Image (cartoon, grey):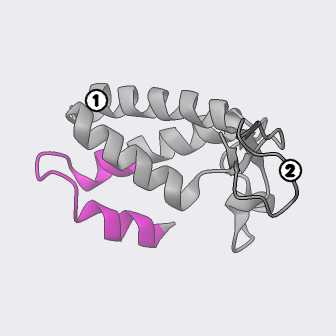
């Protein structure tokens, strides 16, 4: 995690101190862990190399967290909305939980096709 702070702080504003930035990220990590029923810090979970793959959340839960984190960064660090979204996206890319993707697949058949099989190009996924 230290690498994340050192690398990503280079992109942070000069007006935001490293301590304030790190505290905000720690607060976001606590919130992210709480949303999957875990406490932070959690040495049992974070001692693994890919600890962020050991828990999961739905795409909707990730969106809700993303909105919350963007709002939090805007208010606590006075980031612009664009910058807060960028920080949030990077954070989720690096440390977000694994997404649960529903296996439902809506298939639309081309009305002009007479035969449908597994390799039919007239099927498109929506």
Which of the numbered marks, if any, corresponds to residue 18? none
Disc 2 or 1, which lies upstream in sequence? 1
Q: In this view, does 74 lie to the left or right of 101?
A: left
**Measuring 59% from the left and 35% from the top, which residue is drawn there?**
31
Which of the numbered marks, if any, corresponds to residue 115? 2
**Measuring 82% from the left and 46% from the top, which residue is drawn there?**
114
Q: In this view, does 91 lie to the left or right of 114?
A: left
Above or below residue 123? Residue 109 is above
What's the magenta bit mostly, secondary-structure-wise? helix
**Measuring 79% from the left and 35% from the top, which residue is drawn there?**
37
Range of magenta residues? 2-23
Q: Is mark 1 on a helix, strand or loop?
A: helix
Q: Is residue 122 visible?
A: yes
> 91 and 110: which one is in front?
110
The residue that disc 1 covers is 74
Above or below residue 38? Residue 115 is below
Q: What element carries label 2?
A: loop
**Measuring 34% from the left and 34% from the top, which residue is drawn there?**
73
* Residue 16 is one of the magenta-drawn residues: yes
Q: Which of marks 2 and 1 is in front?
A: 2
Residue 75 percent location from the top left of the image: 29, 25
Residue 1 percent location from the top left of the image: 51, 66
Above or below residue 27? Residue 95 is below
Give the class, few, some or many, for how many residues have Cα within 10 Å of label 2's Cα (few <14, many ≥20). Answer: few
Q: Can residue 46 be seen in this view?
A: no
């Amino acid at each position: 995690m230290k690498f994340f702070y050192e690398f990503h702080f280079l992109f942070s504003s000069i007006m935001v101190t490293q301590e304030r930035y790190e505290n905000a990220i720690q607060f976001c990590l606590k919130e992210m862990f709480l949303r999957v029923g875990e406490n932070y810090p959690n040495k049992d979970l974070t001692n693994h190399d890919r600890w962020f793959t050991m828990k999961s959340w739905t795409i909707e839960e990730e969106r809700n967290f993303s909105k919350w984190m963007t709002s939090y960064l805007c208010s606590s660090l006075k980031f612009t909305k664009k910058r807060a979204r960028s920080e949030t996206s990077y954070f989720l890319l690096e440390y977000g939980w694994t997404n649960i993707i529903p296996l439902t697949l809506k298939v639309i058949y081309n009305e002009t096709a007479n035969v449908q099989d597994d390799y039919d190009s007239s099927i498109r996924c929506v």
